[in-house]
């Protein structure tokens, strides 16, 4: 898990950017050939667009950098387990591997509610690693929502 922790730290840095904007603190990075090529963080509230999840932003940038919709040699690191929308995009982009920090009991589609990333009915399955820096990723979200509830 050596490199996984390093790349997840970068995803956490991205999540903190979202937090600074009062966005749900979720961050993502795409790694290609042992190098971070793109990053993304949640901007759904500030952009008021459904598709502004960290994973989708990072995937779209990676498509541009690689020059292809196929990201077959890429690994996506994300602080929170992907939702159904992001899991679908991950499968469609042919990402090789996903590494996530915290499980998502309300929308997780990488094993918690269901596992779209490894469903044998799809023509692509994703390697999956979970619980990388889970405590730190979970704390970001817990603290954010606790603070949000305290304001209301």
Image (cartoon, helix red, strand yellow):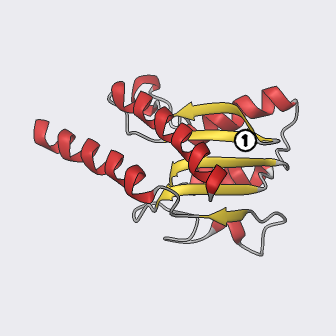
Task: Tell me which residue sits at (43%, 61%) in the image.
Answer: 104
Quarter of the image where the C terminus is located = top left
Q: Position of residue 125 (x, y in %)?
A: 77, 66
Q: Residues within 10 Å of mark 1 (few under 14, many from 20)?
A: many
Task: Tell me which residue sits at (58%, 65%) in the image.
Answer: 110
Q: Position of residue 32 (x, y in %)?
A: 79, 40
Q: Is residue 96 above or below residue 47?
A: below
In front of the other: 101 or 108: 101
Residue 69 makes an appearance in the image: yes
How many numbered circles are shown? Answer: 1
Report which quarter residue 59 is drawn in: top right
Q: Left or right: where does residue 131 sit relative to residue 73?
A: left
Q: Position of residue 120 (x, y in %)?
A: 77, 75
Q: Helix or strand or loop: what does disc 1 sit on?
A: strand
Residue 152 makes an appearance in the image: no
Quarter of the image where the N terminus is located = bottom right
Q: Is residue 13 above or below residue 103?
A: above
Query: Which residue occupies the extreme bottom position in the image?
Result: 120
Report which quarter residue 116 is drawn in: bottom right
Task: Tell me which residue sits at (84%, 65%) in the image.
Answer: 123
Query: Which residue occupies the extreme front position in the image?
Result: 2
In front of the other: 106 or 62: 62
Q: Which residue is mark 1?
A: 31
């Amino acid at each position: 898990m050596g490199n996984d922790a390093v790349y997840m730290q970068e995803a956490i840095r991205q999540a903190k950017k979202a937090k600074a904007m009062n966005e749900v603190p979720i961050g993502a990075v795409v790694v290609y050939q042992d190098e971070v090529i793109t990053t993304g963080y949640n901007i759904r509230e500030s952009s008021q667009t459904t598709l502004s999840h960290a994973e989708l932003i990072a995937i779209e940038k990676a498509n541009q950098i690689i020059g292809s919709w196929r990201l077959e040699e890429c690994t996506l690191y994300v602080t929170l387990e992907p939702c159904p929308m992001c899991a679908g995009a991950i499968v469609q982009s042919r990402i090789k591997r996903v590494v996530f920090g915290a499980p998502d009991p309300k929308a997780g589609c990488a094993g918690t509610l269901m596992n779209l990333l490894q469903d044998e009915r799809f023509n692509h399955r994703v390697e999956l690693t979970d619980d990388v820096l889970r405590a730190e990723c979970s704390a970001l979200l817990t603290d954010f929502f606790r603070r949000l509830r305290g304001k209301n």
